[in-house]
Image (cartoon, helix red, strand yellow):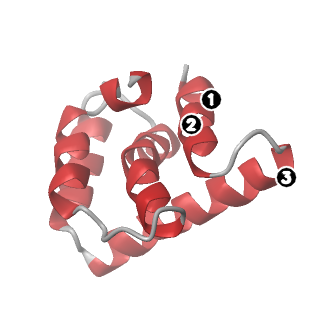
Amino acid sequence: MMQQQFYCAAQQVKGNNMQDEQLDQAMLFEVVENQLADNYPTEVKATLMRLRMTGNSYDDAIALIACALAPEMVDVIERQQSFNLARYVSHLNLLPKTPWLEE
């Protein structure tokens, strides 16, 4: 299940190329890890803890957070829009559900 969710998130960022998908996964995971290290936004750490406490592995929790981050990265990188912190936090709060991937 987690592979499919991340695949959907990676598709939002770059497309179908497997090499690009791997680069995107690494990029998204690195951003999430940086957010955890910086404790900003604080909701990322809270979401990680919540997901871990509900039985998700660390790696699965990071992948879910990356799914929440992906639409924001698309807007910043491809559409030159500002990072939407409120929407990102809203997506974090919905995890492990990912209804934005179905839109």
Depth-wise, is mark 3 or mark 1 nearer the camera? Answer: 3
Circle 2 SS class: helix
Is residue 17 placed above or below 80 in the rendered structure?
Answer: above
Q: Say whether residue 101 is left or right of residue 11.
A: left
Q: CA distance from mark 2 to mark 3?
A: 15 Å
Residue ID for mark 1? 3
Q: Give the image quarter of residue 7.
A: top right
Q: Position of residue 56 (x, y in %)?
A: 39, 32
Of the image marks 3 and 1, the number of the one nearer the N terminus: 1
Q: Where the C terminus falls, by quadrant?
A: top left
Residue 62 numbered tag: none
Residues tagged 2 and 3 counted as in contact (Cβ below 8 A): no
Residue ID for mark 2? 6
Please state which amino acid type lies under the numbered disc 3: Gln
Residue ID for mark 3? 19
Circle 1 SS class: helix
For the point 36% across and 45% down, which residue is it?
Answer: 68
Callout 1: few (<14), some (14-19), or many (20+) C-alpha neighbours within 10 Å?
few
Which one is in front, 47 or 52? 47
Q: Say whether residue 46 is left or right of residue 63.
A: left
Of the image marks 2 and 3, the number of the one nearer the N terminus: 2
Circle 3 SS class: helix
For the point 85% across and 52% down, which residue is it?
Answer: 19
Please state which amino acid type lies under the numbered disc 1: Gln
Q: CA distance from mark 3 to mark 1?
A: 16 Å
Callout 3: few (<14), some (14-19), or many (20+) C-alpha neighbours within 10 Å?
few
For the point 44% across and 71% down, which residue is it?
Answer: 80
Which one is in front, 39 or 27? 27
